[in-house]
Amino acid sequence: MKTLFSNAVYSRVFSISLLMVAIVFAADGVCVGQIIADHTHTDITIIPKAAILQAKAKLHIAYGHTSHGSQITSGMSGLVGFANGGGLGMSYPTDIFKWSNSGLGGALDLHDYAMGGDCGYYPQWVNNTKKYLGNPNPATGRGSRHPDVNVVMWSWCGQVDDKYAAGTLKSEYLIPMAKLEAQYPGIVFVYMTGHVDHWDDANNKAANKLIRDYCKANNKVLYDFADIESYNPDGVYYKFPNDNCDYYASANGAKLGNWAVEWQNSHRKNIDWYNCGSAHSKPLNANLKAYAAWWLWARLGGWNGQP
């Protein structure tokens, strides 16, 4: 099996992990294999109602993050009212995008802040994952403390470029994640790129590329945080953006504008976009993060991605 690591032991871990996940989830009904949520998957209107309902019926998600990662859940919270009001021409049933830590009342079961910290702090993020999940159950491949959890997602704050520069991105993120997959084969672990960082542009781009390449080579599930905040909703690419959506002429060039503010100002609030919390950034960024998250949930729930 192709990997980015030369160590034969880790290659065997990756191969065994992928095989076991495929076997467990064939019966569980949760989709596995390569799934990459990026800026090309931010059209919330193409997701069929049945796919959303199916995801809510199947998924039990544990999400660990700090401030930047809250853009996803803040956007998901604001999406509920936006969709109820017919934003983007949506005509889904009322509260279809509702989510909660319990999943009661037909909501998506997403335990926000399930694990403390974010995946920039090693080995804390690994230890917190194991503490939350409990001992692996050989029969289900899940944890003894939260046996229903079948999806775990961690976000970064601002450490991904530092780990790349220090040469520890593999040893403190990719390899530990693969080990968790092997220990809990009944759980889908969602990988994530870090947010864009104009002030450390080269290391940031290289770090996120390493994560993308690894996920593509090893058929992983990836939420591409950095890619989503590099494009506006019309697909315009910004080569040198920052996490607040400012964009620049070059890595050391002048600031040219803010793509989110510009798009918001030229479109209709509550019709084309909605106001919501968006830590360190602008509401439109969190809108797009929420759309991509729901695309990912629908795909994990078994939807094939076709409108």
Image: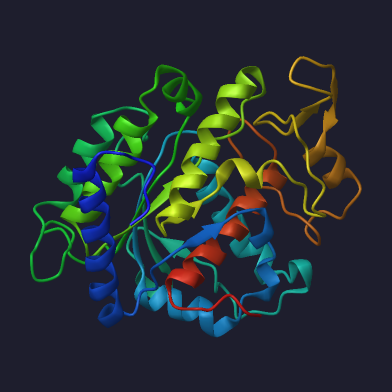
Residue 41 picture quarter: bottom right
In the picture as drawn, the residue positioned furthest to the right comes out as 266
Left or right, 7 with reference to 286: left
Residue name at image x 76 percent, y 14 percent: 252
Query: Hey, which residue is sitting farthest bottom in the picture?
Result: 50
Residue 60 or 222: which is nearer the viewer? 222
Instruction: Give the image location of residue 187, x and y in percent.
Output: 27, 62
Q: Residue, x 87% and y 40% (percent of image)?
A: 262
User: From what the image shows, is residue 43 above or below residue 121?
Assistant: below
Asked if residue 151 lies left or right of residue 228, the reply is left
Image quadrant in which you'd find residue 57: bottom left
Please identify the quadrant where the N terminus is shown. bottom left
Residue drawn at point x = 68 percent, y = 28 percent = 242
* Colouring used for the render: rainbow
Q: Quadrant of residue 268?
A: bottom right
Residue 181 versus residue 243: which sits nearer the camera?
Answer: 181
**Does any portion of residue 277 appear in the rendered image?**
no
Could you say which is closer to the camera, residue 201 or residue 228?
201
Provide residue 82's location: percent of width, then percent of height.
Answer: 68, 63
* Residue 214 or residue 293, whichever sits in front: 214
**Count of numbered marks:** 0
Q: Is residue 234 above or below residue 28?
A: above
Q: Residue at x 21, y 60 (%)?
A: 16
Q: Position of residue 173 (x, y in %)?
A: 34, 36
User: Where the C terminus falls, by quadrant?
Assistant: bottom right
- Indicate the position of residue 38 as horizontal and vertical percent values: 61, 54
Relative vertical location of residue 264 with respect to residue 202 in this rendering, above or below: below
Residue 193 in sight in this render: yes
Q: Is residue 127 above or below residue 84?
A: above
